[in-house]
Image (cartoon, rainbow, N blue to C red):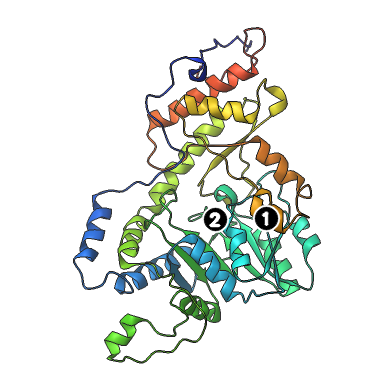
Amino acid sequence: MSVLPIKLEPLAIHGGTPVRKTLLPYGRQSLDDCDIQSVVEVLKSEWLTTGPKVGAFEEALADRVGARFAVSYSSGTAALHGAAFAAGLERGDEAITTPMTFCATANCVLYQGARPVFADVCEDTLNLDPDEVSSKICSHTKAMIAVDYAGHPAALDELKQMATRSGAVLIEDACHALGAEFHGRRVGSLADMTVFSFHPVKHVTSGEGGMVTTDNARFAERLRHFRNHGISSEARQRQESGQWFYEMVALGFNYRLTDIGCALGLSQLRKLETNLLRRREIAAQYAGEFANLPLLLPVVREGVAPAWHLYPIRLKLELFSAGRGEIFRALRAENIGVSVHYIPVHRHPYYRERFPENPGTLPVAERAYEQLISLPMFHSMTPEDVEDVIHAVRKVLTHYAAKDGRASLTPTSSE
């Protein structure tokens, strides 16, 4: 088939008509009447926090991922902190983690007085590169924290073997990956501890909230104490047994998730499969429509079923007449709420000042950051929303890849 020139549309950033009249965010919550009613019922009950909905949500989540225990927290960040505490991280210890994540993944190490050590990521998935992790292991390594970037599970088998050999605890930051599968096994049952987030842009929301799943009874006990001021019993247990006495056995925090949040989380969890299916449909449509654009699209490794929290594209910048910043602004002008995930953690001022040795040592993460743009990806996107994203991406990229008034992009068969 001969390649025909594509008509260039005036960009909104240059005064043209935007693809959309209103902004489409990169992610947002989706609530229905069942969700609202579940919260109303709790508001009318005797327990707003530390009540029966907490245990019910924990049991449902543990059952869904195939773990023995699940311990809820007030946020994904709090859950990461709990996992770092349960792993025994303290001053003098190190935890190897990825720079390609939100800062909370590394911050939880600092909260415990330990040192985060960044290892570079794989070119295809932008997950931790096991070879890079191996080169960072030393006698101070007590934990490895792998992130399932964009919802694609990390190289969990290799990392688990490495952690076991070195005596480290493998913590999986699966805040992007609820519902993902790794070689027929569900994320949440594979690492020593797995952390989930229920922020509004995630697959399941409790408003704010998090959960740690584990098969290790000792970790589960430490996680429960830590989220409750370090106290060994909870208020509901004492009330039901008619007891007042309690003991603080560790220095903990108030990281409890409320019954209000757990009721919402329970209602949302029932829709997880439907939400996953829709995200996978959107990802497949994006992949088909963008296959012949000058982009690096997300890679799915064999045997993996990602959860698609994000859909990050990487621009082949050498093929464009503009940089990532201008292309980003042009997409926003079309009312497509693109974002960037992530500024590598070691590039933030706090980390640059305290760990100046890191810059320049993580070339894959550094290069990826300069190319990345996250497209809208959430399960309540309508077919029209998806078409708007596709239209805007092709419109903007065609403009910046065009030469002499003719676009250098190959049209898809649907055009």
**Amino acid at dot 1:** Tyr
Mark 2 to mark 1: distance in Å? 33 Å
Look at the picture and state if 146 lies above or below 404. Answer: below
Q: Quadrant of residue 292?
A: top right
- Where is residue 219? Give x, y as percent: 55, 77
Viewer-nearest residue: 351 or 6: 351
The residue at the point 31 percent across, 48 percent down is 31
Label 1 neighbour load within 10 Å: few <14, some 14-19, many 20+: some
> In front: 245, or 206?
245
Numbered label tally: 2
Q: Nearer the viewer, residue 312 or 275?
A: 312
Kindly state the secondary structure of the residue where label 1 is placed.
helix
Q: Residue furthest front?
A: 353
Q: Which mark is residue 164?
A: none
Instruction: Tell me which amino acid carries mark 2.
Output: Glu
Residue 131 lies in quadrant = bottom right
Give the residue pinned by disc 1.
351
Residue 251 or residue 310, whichever sits in front? 251
Judge whether 119 appears above or below 161 on screen.
Answer: above
Q: Quadrant of the N terminus?
A: top right
- Which callout, 2 or 1, points to the residue nearer the camera? 1
Q: Residue at x 44, y 69 (%)?
A: 255
Tell me residue 346's x, y (percent): 68, 52
SS under mark 2: strand
**Residue ID for mark 2:** 181
Q: Residue furthest top?
A: 404
Residue 14 x, y percent position in the rendering: 52, 16
Residue at x 78%, y 47% (from the top left corner): 360
Tell me the crowding category of disc 2: few under 14, some 14 to 19, or many 20 or more residues within 10 angstroms, Cα based.
many
170 vs 381, left or right, is right
